[in-house]
Image (tube, helix red, strand yellow):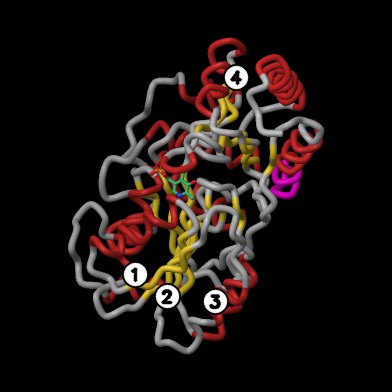
Amino acid sequence: MTLFTVGPVQMHASTLKIAGNQLPYFRDVDFSRVNQNIAQNIKSLLNAPESAGTVLLTASGTGAMEATVMNLFNESDNLLVINGGSFGNRFCEICAMHSIPYTSIQLQFGEVLTESHLTQHAGKNFTGLLVNIHETSTGQLYDIEMLADFCRRNHLLFVVDAISSFLADAFDFSKCNVDGVIISSQKALALSPGLSVVVLSERALRRVEKQERHSIYFDFNLYLKDIERGQTPFTPAVGILLEMDGRLCEIMKMGLEVIIKETAQRAFYFRKRIKSFPIQVYGFPLSNALTPILFDGNAKEVYQTLKEKYGLVLTPSGGSLADTVLRVGHLGALTHTDYDKLSEALAEICEVKQLCLL
Ligand SMILES: *Cc1c(COP(=O)(O)O)cnc(C)c1O
C-alpha cells in the first residue's frame, strides 16, 4: 500500500527504524536532552523568537487545538474564527464547548478567503483570531500575511493551526506576529500520530499564566515550567518524541527550504500530470500538502478501486464532500514514481469506466 493521505503518511525508513526500538526510560538527563532538542529545532524551523514557549503535548491535533483555546481564552474574550471546512468548524465547536464568545467567517466550498471577509469585522472589539492556515478538508491555503496584517491592525491574538501546512508551505512565526502555532506528528513530519507541539509568543505566555485553570492534563503552565528542564508533567509519547527528534535532526541538516521545495515539486508534478484528465482540480489557492480532485458523485467508488486494485490510498472526504472530493497528499516519503503510478491508475479508471466528470 502507498499512502497519498495527509496523516498518517508514508513514513521515512529512518523513522521506521527508530519506531522499532525498545523505548528508554524518560525521567533522566538523556531524555531531557531529546525534549530540549525538539523544542529548539521546532522554534528554529518556525522562526520563533528565543523567548517563545514550547508545549510538548501527548494528544492528537484536536487535543492541542482545544488545549490552546482553553489556555489562551475565556468567557471575556470575543474570537473570530475562519470556518472554511471541518477543521474551522472544529474551532467553533471548541469555543462553544468552553463558552468562549465567537463569530465565524463561513466559507462555502470553493469560496476564497479575501480581505473583504475580514474588513466587515474590523474595529469590532474582537480579542483573537483562530485559523487553520491550510483547511485540510478542502485544500485551501489562506493568505497568512493578510490575516497577520488584520490581527496586527486590530490588536488580535493570532492563533494558527498549521498542522497540515508546517513543512509543506512557508511559515514565519516572527514575521507574521503569530501568538500561538499548533503542529502535530502525523502530517508532514511523517511520524506516528499522537504528539502535538504548541509554540507560544511572550504575549500568549502572559495570558496562560493569568488564566483560571479548568483542566489538569491540559494546563499549559505545567508543561511550560517542566520543559525548562527538558521534561513533561505526565508520561509523554516517548517513542514519538524519539521519532520526532530523529526526523527534526534530518530536516535541520537538509534545510527547511529543501523540504518545502520537494513537497511543492511533488504537488506540481502530480497537478501537471493530471491536467489532461477528465477530473477537476479546484481553483482556490492550494497548499503544497495536498491536491483536492473533484468527481461526479463517484469519489467513494474511485477510492475503493484505487485501494483494492492498485494498492494506492487517497484521502477520502467526509460530510457533504464525501461523494465528490478525493484528496491526494504530497507529504511524507513519496516520490515522482509514486505519482506516475497514481496518475496511470487514475487514467485507467477514468477511461475504462468513464467514472469521472468531464
Ligand atoms: C490533521 C489536522 C488536525 C488534527 O486532527 P487530529 O485527528 O486530532 O489529529 C487539526 N487541524 C488540521 C488543519 C489538520 O489537518
In this rendering, the answer to whether 307 lies above or below 86 is above
Mark 2 closeness class: few <14, some 14–19, many ≥20 residues within 10 Å: many
Q: Which residue is the site of mark 1?
A: 72
Instruction: Give the mark, 4 or 3, whose residue is nearer the N terminus.
Output: 3
Q: Amino acid at mark 2?
A: Gly
The quadrant the C terminus occupies is: top right
Residue at 57%, 79% (x, y): give it: 150
Badge 2 vs badge 1, beta-carbon distance below 8 Å: yes
Instruction: Give the mark, 2 or 3, whose residue is nearer the N terminus.
Output: 3
Closer to us: mark 4 or mark 1?
Answer: 4
Coordinates of residue 318 in the picture (x, y in percent): 43, 39
Can residue 350 be seen here? The reply is yes
Cα–Cα gap, marks 4 and 2 = 41 Å
Closer to us: mark 3 or mark 1?
Answer: 3
Instruction: Give the mark, 3 or 1, whose residue is nearer the N terminus.
Output: 1
Cα–Cα gap, marks 4 and 1 = 41 Å
The residue segment tinted magenta is 253-261
Instruction: Give the mark, 2 or 1, whose residue is nearer the N terminus.
Output: 1
Closer to us: mark 4 or mark 2?
Answer: 4
Q: Which residue is the site of mark 3?
A: 118
Residue 312 shows which numbered tag? Answer: 4
The stretch drawn in magenta includes residue 289? no
Mark 4 closeness class: few <14, some 14–19, many ≥20 residues within 10 Å: many
Instruction: Give the mark, 4 or 2, whose residue is nearer the N terminus.
Output: 2
Residue at 59%, 25% (x, y): give it: 14
